[in-house]
């Protein structure tokens, strides 16, 4: 996914991500769509950061995911 967005500016990349998220939300039930979107966010975080930054982003994502209560409902 990162290569697909390499030629885009930050604003274009943001708009493309919003469109992709909307397609996912339209195609899947809400709970499944949120999990897929979260997975894309995690993958993108790994591609954009150094390993240390990616690990920190992963910890923040897991903390946010656990706070949202979705993890306990699985």
Image (spheres, rainbow, N blue to C red):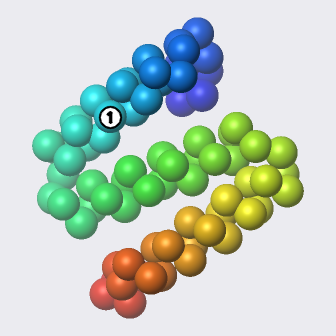
Name above or below for residue 8 compared with residue 57: above
Q: Quadrant of residue 2?
A: top right
How far from the left and from the top, in percent, is residue 21? 30, 40
Residue at x 48% of width, y 54% of height: 39
Name above or below for residue 40 compared with residue 69: above
How far from the left and from the top, in percent, is residue 40? 48, 46
Q: Nearer the viewer, residue 33 or 57?
A: 57
Can you identify the residue that label 1 sits on?
Answer: 18
How far from the left and from the top, in percent, is residue 58? 65, 63
Q: Secondary structure at mark 1?
A: helix
Residue at x 39% of width, y 32% of height: 17
The residue sitting at the bottom extreme is 72
Count of picture labels: 1
Q: Is residue 16 left or right of residue 53?
A: left
How far from the left and from the top, in percent, is residue 26? 14, 43
- Location of the N terminus by quadrant is top right
The residue sitting at the front extreme is 11
- Location of the C terminus by quadrant is bottom left
Name above or below for residue 58 compared with residue 13: below
Name above or below for residue 62 compared with residue 19: below
Q: Is residue 73 left or right of residue 40?
A: left
Q: Nearer the viewer, residue 7 or 43?
A: 7
Q: Is residue 19 left or right of residue 65?
A: left
Q: Quadrant of residue 33?
A: bottom left
Residue at x 27% of width, y 61% of height: 32
Q: Is residue 59 left or right of residue 26?
A: right
The residue sitting at the top extreme is 7
Residue at x 37% of width, y 53% of height: 36
């Amino acid at each position: 996914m990162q290569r697909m967005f390499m030629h885009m500016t930050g604003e274009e990349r943001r708009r493309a991500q919003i469109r992709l998220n909307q397609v996912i939300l339209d195609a899947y039930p809400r709970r499944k769509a949120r999990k897929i979107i979260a997975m894309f966010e995690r993958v993108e975080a790994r591609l954009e950061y150094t390993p240390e930054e990616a690990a920190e982003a992963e910890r923040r994502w897991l903390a946010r995911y656990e706070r949202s209560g979705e993890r306990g409902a699985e």
